[in-house]
Image (cartoon, helix red, strand yellow):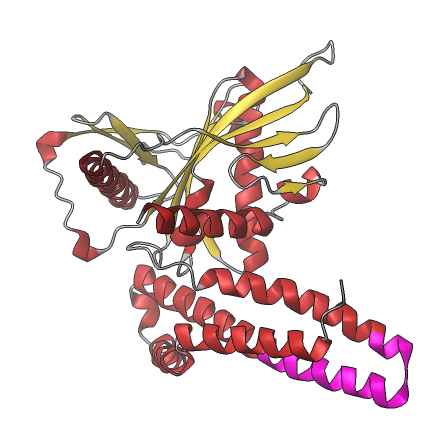
Amino acid sequence: MAAIDPSEEIAELTATMNGIASVLDLDAMRKDIANLGEQAAAPDLWDDQARAQKVTSKLSALQSELDRVEGLLRRLEDVSVLYELAAEEEDDGTRQEADRELDSLRRDVGSMEVRTLLSGEYDAREALVTINSQAGGVDAADWAQMLLRMYLRWAERRGYATEVYDTSYAEEAGIKSATFTVKAPYAYGTLRGEHGTHRLVRISPFDNQGRRQTSFAGVDVVPVVEQADHIEIADDDIRVDVYRASGPGGQGVNTTDSAVRITHLASNIVVSCQNERSQLQNKATAMAVLQAKLLERKRQEEAQAMSELRGEATSSWGTQIRNYVLHPYQIVKDLRTSVEAGNPSAVLDGDIDAFIEAEIRWARKRETDQN
């Protein structure tokens, strides 16, 4: 099979990028950036810290996205020039450099194209992520903490701000659960495919006989609520408990009962927050988390009802989605997309973009096929 002419592939990639730029509406993005820049420069911005963080986070994310699109367009122009230079000078070294850059561009443009697939009702929102240890005892608690680090490292790599609202530490090691937000536009649309059960197979560091252990942790991803969502929660519908925040091993990290736990009585959904020193602030954050979970519950119920009307079968939430095998061989494999990675250490250090992008394409194809 004849190799594709580089000039033809560059033209195809450029056409793809022009389509992406059109979908993202770069002119509108520049106007939004200018507007947010003015807000960020206001001397009274930090009088309202929650608003200030939202403005600066959105400004950073939009600027990063614009820079990414413009950077790819420039690189496509540059690689075309590089091929012309290699041909004129008959320079194999320059040709090989151009080939490497074109290969890199092929991957980067593909990643950028995934962004245009995020068109769901809540996809543009920030994400609220909860991780829970499941079967596997102390290994599962340790596994849950490893997943928490993986997602925080992924967000850090992308320059996304995060805030951990609550961490419930296990007695021996690891965590029982943790809840955090990813404060970036389209964080929910990007991460929603991570929702489900993640399975780890390894030699247990907590087993003195060095036996292999399988452990599980659940990841829950919901969109952050906005004022327009109208999720009403009456005082009679909830129970509010206050307690002293604690760290690893149960050690106290605060001298007052500032941590807040809220139980929604009808659904038995329990949320908590202990990252602020103020009980009122923790209660407000916990209420926002509860609203997000109730909004997602309502959305799922509506989707289930619609599927039943159509006579469709729907898969339940919480099913196993990915295996992380560290022994007897090393591989990470997604059970839906069949995407694999042979370097689990890199994956657990936040290198999960290949899985996320494949999930988004898989979900979009599935939605299209159902429609």
In the image, residue 94 lies in the stretch drawn in magenta: yes
104 and 168: which is toward the camera? 104
Q: Residue at x 36, y 31 (%)?
A: 315
Most common SS among magenta residues: helix
- Confirm whether residue 19 shows in the render: yes
Query: In x, y percent, where is residue 95?
Result: 83, 76
343 sits to left or right of 241: right
Q: Residue at x 33, y 61 (%)?
A: 49
Residue 140, relative to residue 275: is it above or below?
above
Q: Residue at x 41, y 52 (%)?
A: 364
80 sits to left or right of 52: right
Magenta stretch, residue numbers: 71-95
Query: In x, y percent, where is residue 119?
Result: 35, 59
| Quadrant where the N terminus is found in the figure | bottom right
Residue 187, relative to residue 237: is it above or below?
below
Query: In x, y percent, where is residue 228?
Result: 17, 57
Query: In x, y percent, where is residue 8?
Result: 66, 77
